[in-house]
């Protein structure tokens, strides 16, 4: 059996390797287009755009304007 899961980048279609044992909520980045994804299912592994997921807390990005 393969020791890695491979999923297709939702942005550019490149293969993204997700480590076996990845859990829902883990993040991964496409090496081709640098889009960040989050693991949303683990059997089989599925990913979704990190930006589109709504988390409980508001995320504070680096680019504050002060
Ligand atoms: Zn990509």
Image: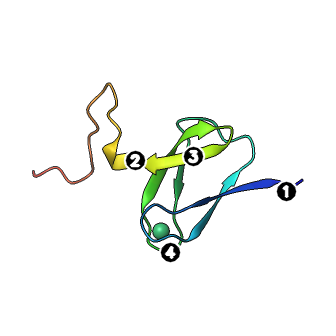
**Where 6 falls versus 40 (above or below)?**
below
Cα distance, mark 4 to mark 2?
16 Å
Q: Residues within 10 Å of mark 2 (few under 14, many from 20)?
A: some
Question: Could you say whether the residue bearing mark 2 is in a helix, strand or loop?
Answer: helix
Return the disc, 4 or 3, that comes first in the chain's sequence.
4
SS class, disc 4:
loop
CA distance separating discs 3 and 2? 12 Å
First of labels 1, 2 by sequence position: 1
State the mark number for residue 11: none
> Residue 12: x percent and y percent?
45, 71
Is 58 placed left or right of 8 in the picture?
left
Q: Position of residue 41 (x, y in %)?
A: 58, 37
Count residues near mark 3 (Cα–Cα under 10 Å), then give few for <14, some for 14-19, many for 20+: some
> Does the Cβ of the disc 2 residue fall within 8 Å of ligand 1?
no
Of 51 and 48, nearer the camera is 48
Residue designated by label 3: 46
Q: Nearer the viewer, mark 1 or mark 4?
A: 1
Q: Which mark is residue 32?
A: 4
Give the quarter of the image for residue 3.
bottom right
Q: Is mark 4 within 8 Å of ligand 1?
A: yes
Residue neighbourhood size for the residue with mark 1, other residues' Cα within 10 Å, grouped as few (<14), some (14–19), many (≥20): few
Residue drawn at point x = 26 percent, y = 32 percent: 58
Of label 1 and label 4, which has the lower sequence position? 1
State how far apart marks 4 and 3 are (Cα).
Answer: 18 Å
Q: Quadrant of residue 34?
A: bottom left
The residue singled out by tag 2 in the image is 50
Residue 31 percent location from the top left of the image: 54, 70
The label nearer to you, 3 versus 2, is 3
Name the residue: 27% across, 51% down: 62
Instruction: Kindly check if marks 1 and 4 are in contact, taking CB atoms under 8 A apart as contact.
Output: no
- Image mark for residue 2: 1
């Amino acid at each position: 059996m393969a020791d890695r899961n491979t999923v297709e980048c939702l942005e550019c279609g490149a293969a993204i390797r997700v480590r076996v044992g990845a859990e829902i909520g883990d993040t991964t980045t496409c090496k081709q287009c640098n889009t960040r994804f989050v693991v949303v299912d683990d059997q089989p592994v599925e990913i979704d755009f990190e930006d589109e997921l709504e988390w409980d807390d508001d995320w504070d990005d680096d680019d504050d304007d002060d």
